[in-house]
Amino acid sequence: MVQFVAGLKGTMSEAELHVLRARLIGGMLNKARRGELQCRIPIGFVYDATGRVVLDPDQQVQQTIRVFLETFRRTGSATATVKRFREEGLAFPRRYWHGPRKGDVVWGPLDHPRTLFVLHHPRYAGAFVYGRTHHRKLDRKYRKRPQEEWIALVHDAHPAYISWEQFEEHQTMLRENAAVHGHDRRRSPPREGPALLQGLVICGKCGLRMTVRYRHAHGTLFPIYMCQREGIQHGHALCQHITGTSIDDTIGALVIDAVSPLALEVSLGVQQELHARLDEGDALRRKAIERAQYDADLARQRFMRVDPNNRLVADSLEADWNEKLRQLTEAQDRYRQQHDADCAALTEEQRQRILALAHDVPRLWHDPATPVRERKRMLRLIIEDVTLLKGKELVMHVRFRGGATRTLTVPRPAPAWALRRTNPEVVAEIDRLLDEYTDVEIARVLNERGFQSKAGKPVDIMMVARVREHYHLTPRYERLRDRGLLTLDEVSQALGISTATAKQWRLAGLLRAHAYNDKNQYLYERPGPDAPARYTWKGITRWKRQRRSQSDPSHEVQCEA
Ligand SMILES: [Zn+2]
C-alpha cells in the first residue's frame, strides 16, 4: 500500500512536471511571439541595462559588420566577401558563449560558415525571430524551417544594420548563387572561362537555362552554349547547341555601344567605390590600433598599481602587459603594411587604369590584359539575359537591366570543326611534301621552313595527320603505288627471295625503298637489270658458298634473277 502510494505520488509529480514544463514553454513561446524573449543575439548587438537589444556600442564591432555587409552587396558572393577580408587583413569579431571568458569578444579571420550565418540572420535587419530551426528527436539533428513556419518573426523589433528589403535581397542573391550548382541554373555569378554569356543564356526553344561547354583547339577555348538538361534528364537528344564565338563578339559590340555615353559616370562610380573601400578598411585597422593601445595602457596601469612585494601578481601582470604591447606592435605593423599596399596599388596601376577607363571603355573591353571575369562583370551591369534561337539564322533577344530589349540576327555560326581550319598555304605544302616524305618528316621540314600552327606552336605529327585526313589528301601509300612501287611481298616474289631477305637487302642498300609511314613500312622500287641476285649477298652460309665454289667456281657471281 505504502509502495502504491509512493508510486502514485511519483506519477503525480511526473504529470505535474509535464504540465509545468508545457506552461513554461507556452509562456516562453508567447514571449517569443511578442518578440520579448531574451535569447542569444548575434555579434553586433548587445542587451542594454533594461534588457533591450541595441547595436554593440563598440565602434570597431559595428564598423566591421557594416563593412562586411557592404562587401557582400558589392561582390554578390559570400566566398568573395571572405576573400576580401582575408586579402585586406581585416578581422571579424566573435563572442565567447561559454568558459571563463564568457561574454568576451575575440577577433579572428572571417570564414565561410560565419559569413553565411551573419547573412542569413534576420536580426541584422532588426527582426526578432524565433524557431527558425527545429530539433528532431529522431535523428538528433537541427533542421531549417521555411520562413512561413517560423514561430515568431517580428519586424523592426530593434535597431538594425540593414533594412528588411536588403535582407531579402541578400537571401535571393545567396539562393541564386547556390542554385548555380543545383536544379535550375539561374542567372549565375561570373566564373572563370572565356564564354562571356556564361550564366546569362536562355534557350529560345524550351526556355531553360543554357550551359557552357568549351572546346579546346589550337590552344584556344571556344565556347559552345548548350541546352542539354532535358536531354540528359529524360534521355532526349540535345535541344540545341550553338558555337559561341560570334555571339560573344556581337554582344561585345553591343555592350560597347551601350556603355560609351555612360563611361564617365561608371568609372567615376568605380573610383569612388575604390576610395571608399580603402578608407573603410583603413579606419577599421586604425581602430584596432587604438584598441590595442588602450589595452596596453590598461595593462601598464594595472602593473604599476600592484604592490611590488606581491611577486606572483606582479609577474603575471607584467607578462600581460608585455603580451598587450606585442599585440599593439602587431596591429601597427599590419596597419602600416596594408596602408602601404593600398597607396601603392592606387597610385601606380589602378589610378592609371581608372583614368583610362573614364575615357575609354571600349579600349578596356578589348584590352587583352583585362581579365575575362571583369569583362563578364561589366556585361552583367548592363545585360539581364540573352535568349538564343538557332534557325536559318541565329536570333538573339537581349534583355537589358531595366527592361529594355533588343533583337539581333546574326548568320549562323560556323560549326566547331570549321574553327580548326588550317591555313590553305600549309595544306598545299603538306600535299606537295607527301610525295617525298612521311608525316614525321613533313613536320620536321615545315618547322625548318618556319611554319607554325595557328596557336603559334611548332608543327607536330598530329597536326600533319589531322590535316591530311581532314582535307582528304591522297595518302602517301597510294602515291607511291601509283608510281609503280612494289610491296614487300611483290618485290620478294619478283626476286625469288624471302621477305626477310628483302628487308635485309633494303637495309644493306641493295634494294631501293621508300617509307610510306613512320612505322618502318616501305614500298620498293622495281628491281632493274642491275638488281642483286640471290646468293651474292652474304646471307648465304659460308659452307654453302664454299661447296658451290668447289663444284663450279664460275657460278660464284652469277645472277640468278
Ligand atoms: Zn532548350
Image (spheres, rainbow, N blue to C red):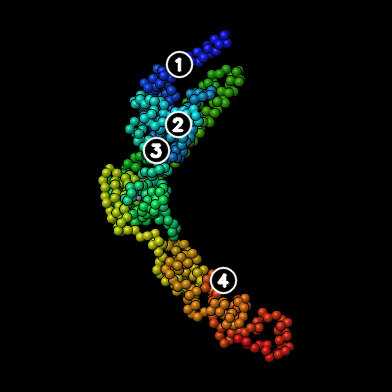
Where residue 520 is drawn, which disc sits there? 4
Residue indicated by mark 1: 19
> Any atom of ligand 1 within 8 Å of the CB at mark 2?
no
- The crowd level at tag 4 (other Cα within 10 Å; few <14, some 14-19, many 20+) is few
Q: Amino acid at mark 2?
A: Arg
CA gap, disc 2 and disc 3: 19 Å
Instruction: Compare marks 2 and 4 and give the one earlier in the sequence.
Output: 2
Q: Amino acid at mark 3?
A: Leu
Place residue 556 in its image quadrant: bottom right
| Disc 1 secondary structure class | helix
- The crowd level at tag 2 (other Cα within 10 Å; few <14, some 14-19, many 20+) is few
| Disc 2 secondary structure class | strand
Q: Give the residue furthest to the front.
A: 1
Q: Is residue 496 above or below residue 134?
A: below
Q: Position of residue 451 (x, y in %)?
A: 45, 67
Q: Position of residue 383 (x, y in %)?
A: 31, 46
Where residue 449 is drawn, which disc sits there? none
Instruction: Compare marks 1 and 2 and give the one earlier in the sequence.
Output: 1
CA gap, disc 3 and disc 1: 42 Å
Residue 75 seen anywhere in this rendered image of the structure: no
Residue 556 seen anywhere in this rendered image of the structure: yes
Check if mark 1's residue and mark 4's residue have beta carbons within 8 Å. no
Residue indicated by mark 3: 174
Front: mark 2 or 4: 2
Where residue 143 is drawn, which disc sits there? 2
Front: mark 2 or 3: 2
Q: Position of residue 215 (x, y in %)?
A: 42, 56
CA gap, disc 3 and disc 4: 62 Å
CA gap, disc 1 and disc 2: 27 Å
Front: mark 1 or 4: 1
Instruction: Compare marks 3 and 1 and give the one earlier in the sequence.
Output: 1
